[in-house]
Image: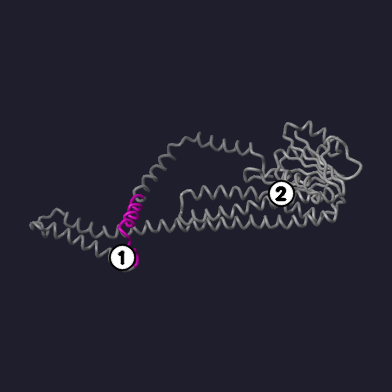
Amino acid sequence: MLLRAVHFEPGECAAAVDPSAGLPESGWVWIDVTAGRDDHDELAELVEQMGLDALAVRDAVEDVDLPKVDDFGTFVLVVLHALAEDRIETYELDCFLSERRLVTVHDQRSLSVDVLWEGVLCRPELARGGPDEALARLADVATRRLVSVLDVFDDRNDELIDLALNADADFLIEITAVRADLAELRRAVHPQREVLDILRHSTTPLVSDSGRRRFSDVFDTASRVAQGVDGARTALAETLDAYRGAEARQATEVTKVLTVYAAIMLPLSLVAGFFGMNFVDLPLLANSTGWIIVTGFMAFIAVVSVGVFVALGWTRRPSGRTAGAVLGRGLVEAARAPAQLVGAVFEISTMPMRSVAGSVTGARRTRSSEPPDD
């Protein structure tokens, strides 16, 4: 367990003090604790020295809670969520606010706490006010770090739009990852906005009028973050619709090529089938140039058919390379579809039920091992 404390005197710079020492005669103290699940005994001793409720501290440290506010009379427990250091994920930041003490507890390094901690040591104006204003500044730093995620999303969404318009095969994987990050952020942002709303209207004597004004400013920032997250989810839905439209357009192009190809081959197959009948009285059978005449007639039909399709606007006149690529892709898709269908049926029919049950059981075990969202 890591402990550090700093003492604030009106009109003076902050000074580091012993965390285990009692309250000084004047001013107030900020104690920051980094404690894991194995540090409960040490944390319990510290809590007893500070006069906090051991059950409230245990509930805050051991359980994974959404942002909330609990008023215990002599102190207020404020649970905030801050952005992790190296990934889009939030962690719990427990803040115990009393008349002359602010205690912050977290289980990992907190950039939000570190930034404000270094700031109050270097800039005395950040230490003005009491512990309630310091808590408001800490909530402001934690909330503004969440705003930076929305800036990253704007750049990422531009890349997703490019993938969607090109119907890229990796688009679904990318958008699923982004939606998971936004869902993680949304689970923290909306409850945190409610917490700030409660604090800015709180009637507890532990929060001063200036503290309420600061919490009102932070509430405005949290509201912008919540609106930005909801707007980002809407933008992802529109991007997904664009991907579906691009995918449908590509499928339509392939289907159009196959349809034109089939329409050209149909009269040629009719001619070949007619002259393939086993009758001795068929015309041009005894003529040595009959096959040349029939072949030329079939070529004429093919050229006329392509000309009709181009004139009607059903297909355009692409270059030879483009036409070959589109036609080749269409033939590959047409040839691969039956194989995929047969393979899927074969896999389903031969899949043992035990493996399916095992995968479901494994998924349930994985979910049960994860901390609950609520």
266 sits to left or right of 37:
left
96 sits to left or right of 187:
right
Give, as a single range, the part of the protein colored magenta. 313-332
For the C terminus, the image quarter is top right
- The answer for how far apart the CA atoms under marks 1 and 2 are is 63 Å
- Does the magenta-highlighted stretch encompass residue 213? no
Where does the image place residue 221, in percent across and percent down from the top left? 71, 56
148 sits to left or right of 46:
left
For the N terminus, the image quarter is top right
Label 2 secondary element: helix
Q: 346 or 2, which lies in front?
A: 2
Q: Is residue 360 above or below residue 293?
A: above
Q: 204 or 215, which lies in front?
A: 215
Label 1 secondary element: helix
Residue at the (88%, 40%) spot, across then down: 23
**Based on the displayed image, in which of its 4 quarters is residue 72 positioned?**
top right
Give the dominant element type of the magenta stretch: helix, strand or loop: helix
**The residue under label 1 is which amino acid type?**
Phe
Q: 157 or 177, which lies in front?
A: 157
**Based on the displayed image, in which of its 4 quarters is residue 5 positioned?**
top right
Residue at the (24%, 63%) spot, across then down: 303
Q: Nearer the viewer, mark 1 or mark 2?
A: 2
Q: Residues within 10 Å of mark 2 (few under 14, many from 20)?
A: many
Residue topped by disc 1: 309
Per the rendering, the mark at residue 142 is 2
**Based on the displayed image, in which of its 4 quarters is residue 267 positioned?**
bottom left
